Image (cartoon, rainbow, N blue to C red):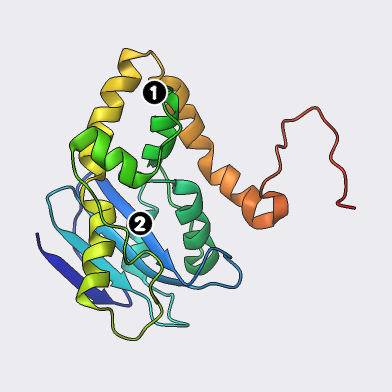
Amino acid sequence: MTITLHIGDLPAGLSFGDCVAVDTESMGLNWDRDRLCVVQLSSGDGNAHLVQLPKGQYDAPNLKKLLTDPKVLKLFHFARADLAAIKRWLGVMPAPVYCTKIASIFVRTFTDRHGLKDLSKDLIGVDMSKEQQTSDWGAATLTDAQQTYAASDVLHLHKMKTKLDAMLARENRTELARQVMDFLPVRTELDLQGWFGVDVFSHKPLRRPE
């Protein structure tokens, strides 16, 4: 495994093929307050590229071009959170997208464990460490442990997608899952505009909190 760290943007001309695994690390989970710090990517070849984004430096034209390339599928786990962070801080909405968590929910109906660590262990036999998950991603210098952790979140997504796609096909749910994933950018826009946690399709009227 090779981990390559880039500061501020990807180098021009770097190709990830027609499907790139993507993950993000932020200062927290409040997209308005907690800035985006790292975007990690992998083509599924066992190597990872990390883009560290210094505070206030979100131009990253090469990264944005990749994330919005209609010919490249962006592969996430729990895409909804990553899309929100990317749209809020980089100003672009990745598309098209695939979410391994959504795929898992559609086909692994025998369990409620759809986290990345669970999928990695159950589908491909890889036991992932989440030790660095809550570390300081805004630090000026990322530690080797942080870089290894960040890379691990994208290195195995292609293999998981292959397994999940086979299960979706077996259960005749491929098209349904695709349509839900196509809706993810819209769902993310709703989150960012204040409808997080609201089921806009519910018949039950919404009430203001008392």
Q: Position of 139 compared to 146: left or right?
A: right
Per the rendering, the mark at residue 165 is none
Residue located farthest toward the left when viewing the structure as drawn:
1
Q: Which is nearer the eye, 154 or 72?
A: 154
Instruction: Say if residue 204 shows up in the picture.
Output: yes
- Residue situated in front as seen by the camera: 9 or 21: 21
Task: Tell me the number on the disc at residue 107.
Answer: 1
Q: Secondary structure at mark 2?
A: strand
Residue 71 in which image quadrant: top left
Residue 115 screen position, x and y as percent: 39, 43
Q: Which residue is found at the position 41% from the left and 18% from the top?
A: 173
Q: Which tag is nearer the camera, tag 2 or tag 1?
A: 1
- Residue for point 86% across, 51% down: 209
Judge left or right: residue 196 versus residue 18.
right
Q: Do the residues bearing badges 2 and 1 touch, measured as CB atoms within 8 Å? A: no
Q: Quadrant of residue 170 in the image? A: top left
On the picture, is 11 further left or further right than 22?
left
Mark 1 closeness class: few <14, some 14–19, many ≥20 residues within 10 Å: many
Q: Position of residue 62 (x, y in %)?
A: 31, 66
Residue 23 marker: 2
Residue kind at label 2, given as amino acid type: Asp
The vertical placement of 44 against 204, above or below, is: below
User: Between disc 2 and disc 1, whose residue precedes?
Assistant: 2
Q: Residue at x 26, y 34 (%)?
A: 122
Residue type of the residue flagged with mark 1: Val
**Distance (Cα) linking label 2 and label 1:** 22 Å
| Residue ID at (32%, 46%) | 117
Residue 18 x, y percent position in the rendering = 24, 43
- In the rendered view, would you say 152 is above or below 44? below
Locate the N terminus and report the quarter of the image it occupies.
bottom left
Quarter of the figure with residue 19: top left
